[in-house]
Image (cartoon, rainbow, N blue to C red):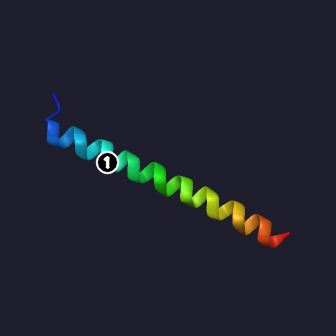
Amino acid sequence: MYSPELNSALVHIRFLVRKLIMERGFLDKVEDNAAV
């Protein structure tokens, strides 16, 4: 069983990872457009 604190921490980490991936993908698109 997860403790509430651990569960909320995992949710927060997943949110940060998803945000990081989205920002990374956005930057990759910007770089692709700049290279054209």
**The residue tagged with tag 1: helix, strand or loop?**
helix
Report the side of 3 relative to 25 (left or right): left
- Graded by Cα atoms within 10 Å as few (under 14), some (14 to 19) or many (20 or more), the crowding at tag 1 reads few
> Residue 10: x percent and y percent?
28, 43
> Residue 18: x percent and y percent?
47, 49
Report the side of 19 relative to 33 (left or right): left
Report the side of 19 relative to 28 (left or right): left
Furthest toward the top, the residue is 1
Give the amino acid type for the residue marked by disc 1 in the picture: His
Quadrant of res 6: top left
Report the side of 13 relative to 32 (left or right): left
Residue drawn 55% across the image and 53% down it: 22
Q: Which quadrant, please, contains the C terminus? A: bottom right
> Residue 24: x percent and y percent?
57, 60
Q: Which quadrant, please, contains the N terminus? A: top left
Residue drawn 63% across the image and 64% down it: 27
Residue drawn 67% across the image and 62% down it: 28
**Residue that mark 1 sits on:** 12
Figure check: 14 above or below 32: above
Furthest toward the right, the residue is 36
Figure check: 6 above or below 19: above
